[in-house]
Image (spheres, rainbow, N blue to C red):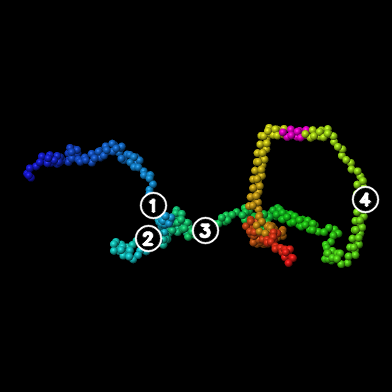
């Protein structure tokens, strides 16, 4: 059975018979086409033909033809509030460690060092600390000359991260704490220090000195004239004297001790005068009664009708004039409109001017903050014999502390001291005792 072979087997063996290799020398031109393996080229051409049938070569096709974008939402597990806060803190801590580089130098434990020695037998590399960086910078700065005021020897830190930058600036005291809202409040626009006149100099010109001293003298004369006017108003008229203590006591005790008889005589005289006056008034009344009163004449019917017609005519004439005036207003609409517009513009201008004056009064004036009234400081000046040509011989005038105090009061930064006025309103009610009738009867 083994010696014979089936025909099917012979056919299969014949189909799979190995092709003999071509025996050609490699230095001949004929070997270029027969001895080269062209299977890679055929596979490449076959792949290109397949790609062209499917829509084109892959390397030449667009990304939208090859890929599709999945727009369906990703099913994410919802976290609780505490879990989200913990993850956010962890993420921020990791970002801070990466950005700023403030990772704590953790010393490896003995157990981990033993494992490293047994496995790698290599020393553990330490992370360079800030001190080493500073020492390296100092060593490099010693090598090269540098400007002490220009160069910054501090360790450079990336301040792009907001929270890390704020923490660094606060710890290094480079960032001030949050200022209150009233810090930038503008109390006044007046200058902090007033520049004195040229005439107040230690060696002024003659014209400036005369002008400056003349203004002070005029103000003093005006004050003296006001005091004289007030003194004249309070002075007594010629022939009048002030009331003494004896005269006041005599006036208060009049009619109480020794003037009883004089008072009785005066009462009798007054009673006799009143009786005479009463008798005279009775005679006058009798005379008036005897006089007959003149009666008014009665109007006739025609007179009354004429008055009614005249009254109606006057009323109708007034109505006609009023109607004509209203009709004439229709032809003056443009003129009235223009007058109204002009009036509104004038009102707006006055309002702007009033607002401007109010702002100037607020920021350039002195408000009454305290109980006292602000009084400006007196202008200092030197007499002609006190003027010198050298500052060493100058006689000091004024006081710096008083000048600063007046400046604060003038700029509404300090309250003016003074006595507080007592309020006239009753702060608490008074108890009133009432005795009821039932209680009184008891």
Cβ atoms under marks 3 and 2 closer than 8 Å: no
Q: Nearer the viewer, mark 1 or mark 4?
A: 4
Position of 368 with respect to 299 (left or right) is: left
Q: Residue at x 44, y 54 (%)?
A: 161
Main secondary structure found in the magenta portion: helix
Disc 3, SS: loop
Q: Residue at x 65, y 43 (%)?
A: 348
Return the x and y of residue 199 as percentages of the image width and height.
68, 55
From the image, tell me which residue sits under label 2.
Answer: 127
Judge whether 341 appears above or below 152 on screen.
above
Return the x and y of residue 423 as percentages of the image width and height.
69, 59
Disc 1, SS: loop
From the image, tell me which residue sits under label 3.
Answer: 177
Whichever of callouts 3 and 4 sits on the residue coming sooner in the sequence is 3
Whichever of callouts 3 and 1 sits on the residue coming sooner in the sequence is 1
Indicate yes or no whether the magenta region holds residue 315.
yes
Question: What number is the disc on residue 283?
Answer: 4
């Amino acid at each position: 059975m083994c010696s014979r072979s089936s025909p099917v087997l012979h056919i299969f063996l014949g189909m799979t018979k190995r092709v003999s290799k071509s025996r050609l020398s490699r230095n001949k031109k004929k070997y270029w086409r027969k001895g080269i393996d062209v299977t890679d080229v055929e596979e490449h051409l076959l792949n290109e033909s397949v790609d062209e049938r499917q829509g084109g070569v892959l390397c030449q096709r667009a990304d939208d033809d090859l890929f599709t974008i999945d727009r369906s939402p990703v099913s994410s597990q919802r976290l609780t509030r505490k879990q989200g806060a913990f993850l956010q803190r962890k993420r921020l801590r990791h970002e801070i460690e990466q950005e700023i580089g403030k990772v704590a130098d953790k010393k490896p434990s003995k157990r981990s060092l033993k494992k490293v020695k047994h496995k790698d037998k290599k020393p553990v590399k330490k992370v360079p600390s800030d001190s080493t960086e500073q020492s390296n910078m100092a060593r490099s700065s010693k090598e090269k000359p540098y400007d002490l005021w220009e160069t910054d020897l501090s360790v450079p830190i990336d301040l792009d991260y907001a929270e890390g930058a704020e923490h660094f600036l606060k710890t290094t005291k480079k960032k001030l704490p949050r200022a209150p809202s009233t810090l930038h409040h503008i109390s006044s626009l007046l200058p902090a220090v007033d520049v004195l006149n040229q005439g107040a100099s230690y060696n002024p010109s003659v014209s400036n000195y005369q002008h400056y001293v003349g203004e002070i003298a005029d103000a003093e004369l005006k004050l003296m004239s006001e005091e004289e006017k007030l003194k004249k108003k309070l002075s007594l008229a010629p022939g009048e004297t002030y009331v003494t203590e004896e005269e006041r006591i005599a006036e208060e005790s009049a009619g109480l001790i020794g003037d009883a008889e004089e008072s009785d005589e005066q009462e009798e005289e007054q009673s006799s005068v009143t009786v005479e006056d009463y008798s005279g008034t009775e005679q006058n009344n009798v005379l008036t009664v005897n006089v007959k009163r003149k009666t008014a004449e009665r109007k006739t019917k025609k007179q009354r009708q004429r008055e009614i017609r005249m009254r109606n005519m006057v009323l109708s004439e007034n109505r006609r004039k009023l109607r004509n005036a209203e009709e004439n207003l229709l032809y003056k609409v443009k003129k009235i409109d223009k007058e109204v517009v002009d009036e509104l513009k004038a009102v707006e201008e006055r309002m702007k001017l009033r607002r401007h004056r109010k702002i100037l009064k607020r920021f350039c004036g002195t408000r009454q903050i305290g109980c006292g009234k602000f009084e400006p400081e007196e202008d200092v000046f030197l007499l002609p014999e006190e003027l010198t040509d050298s500052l060493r011989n100058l006689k000091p005038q004024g006081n710096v502390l008083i000048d600063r105090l007046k400046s604060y009061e003038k700029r509404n930064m300090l309250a003016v001291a003074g006595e507080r006025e007592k309020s006239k309103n009753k702060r608490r009610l008074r108890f009133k005792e009432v005795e009821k009738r039932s209680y009184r009867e008891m």
